[in-house]
Image (spheres, rainbow, N blue to C red):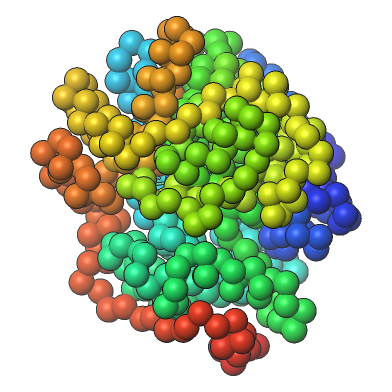
Amino acid sequence: MDEMIFYSTNLSAPEVSFEDALLRGIAPDKGLYMPRSMPHIEIDEIAGMKGMSYAQVAFAILEKVLCPGVDSGSLRRICEEAYDYEVPVERVSDADYVMRLDRGPTASFKDFAARLMARLVQYFTGKQKREIVILTATSGDTGSAVAQAFFGLENIRVVVLFPEDEVSDRQRKQMTTLGGNVTCVAVSGTFDDCQAMVKEAFADGGLSGLNLSSANSINIGRLIPQMVYYFYGYSRAADDGEEVVFSVPSGNFGDIMGGLLAREMGLPVARFIAAVNENDEFVRFVDSGSYSKIVPSKNCVSNAMNVGHPSNLSRLVALYGGQMDENGRILKMARMDDIRGDIFAVSVSDDETRDTIKRVYDEFGVVLEPHGAVGWRGVEMFREGFGNKGKVVCIETAHPAKFPHEVIEATGVDVEVPLSISRVEGKKEIVDALGVDYLGFREYLLNRFL
Ligand SMILES: *Cc1c(COP(=O)(O)O)cnc(C)c1O
């Protein structure tokens, strides 16, 4: 096997190995790293996954992508350590399945990527004997998944910036109660302010001594692990060779990019449903072929998907032969008809989201939270539009207990809080506070981490 090669979506940076792409986060021309090509997997091998555990499926897929850059014994161990929790695939009705990616330590699907990525970063920094600082801006779920995943790892320090008023209590405590190598900074501004400060730090040559890297989904190390659950879900729901539909509640489009890459490898997918909330810039792009971001993004109940300009769109456009720069400008048009054939894009309002939580509970006794409900409503609209009766796997990206208010309101069910959430409740929080001021942030980083 040859090692995989990654190029930058801005096409003005050298190609790199996975190791370099992972540790850099973003390419020097501000583009995102994309695989030049994907290895192929035979349908027989996919059929063989029916009896495998999640960790075994992860190893089977990732071995093709990451070895020999990562030695295969280490990769097997990394997969076993990262995936020591359940991944339920529930059959809801004849052809409808819900895959729950909410049983990890922070009860969101982001644990799947963060836990593998953290161990890969440690593997490579250990080999290179160097220290790095992972810098991440979060609106809630990314920061907690990343902080939990990197907590206690050697040679890696983590700095999470979050908007002090936009993160829920539970999300905040998942990060701020850790301590050790995890530093949390409450910024008196919005998520966009945090994101801007982080971006400026990455572009700041004066900080190169810190070895900054990113754990946001601009990092290809976040996407590669997200291919795995599409194979896993397929193995649990599909008969051999059958094509299935995946419905993906989407914000920054990292989740669905994992699916698209899995399909590149040979997973039989009939179509992806990209279900977004009222931030519908992608739906309008697919309909019209022209793109404009939504500024500021709309505040919807599925709050982890309040994204007005998905950072992974430049990767999606690249996959279909086009080019989009980091500001959302299209330099070369993608094959839009192919995108339309592969992806059904749909926007779901907050009212429909709440209504869906209620209906799915009344009809099937299944509890969804707002993000999963957006995905489910996407399936209904897809079936109405296409008369499709094939199997659908709907991805549930968070645990209902993370959204107690919305869930009780719609269903009357007071969902039991998983241990992952309850165990941080009474713990002491350690947080630094900063204003929206890049120079102040820069000083802080240099003083604390150089
Ligand atoms: C991050 C997140 C999403 C959106 O995933 P993307 O990869 O950004 O499209 C959906 N649901 C939940 C609960 C999330 O935390």
- Can residue 19 be seen in the rendering of this structure? no
Residue 411 image-quadrant placement: top left
Query: Residue 283 vs residue 330: left or right?
Result: left
- Can residue 117 be seen in the rendering of this structure? yes
Residue 40 locus on image (x, y percent): 74, 26
User: Does 175 appear above or below 255?
Assistant: below
User: Does 55 appear above or below 262?
Assistant: below
Residue 390 locus on image (x, y percent): 46, 10
Question: Dividing the image into 4 quarters, which one contains the N terminus?
Answer: top right
Q: Residue at x 57, y 16 (%)?
A: 270
- In this view, the residue in front, 321 or 269, is 321
Residue 360 locus on image (x, y percent): 24, 26
Q: Residue at x 26, y 49 (%)?
A: 403
Q: Residue at x 66, y 26 (%)?
A: 339
User: Does 441 appear above or below 86?
Assistant: below
Q: How many marks overall?
A: 0
Residue 357 image-quadrant placement: top left
Residue 70 locus on image (x, y percent): 71, 51
- In this view, the residue in front, 390 or 438, is 438
Q: Residue at x 27, y 30 (%)?
A: 356
Query: Residue 192 vs residue 414: left or right?
Result: right
Question: Dividing the image into 4 quarters, which one contains the C terminus?
Answer: bottom right
As drawn, the residue found furthest toward the left would be 412
- In this view, the residue in front, 396 or 317, is 317
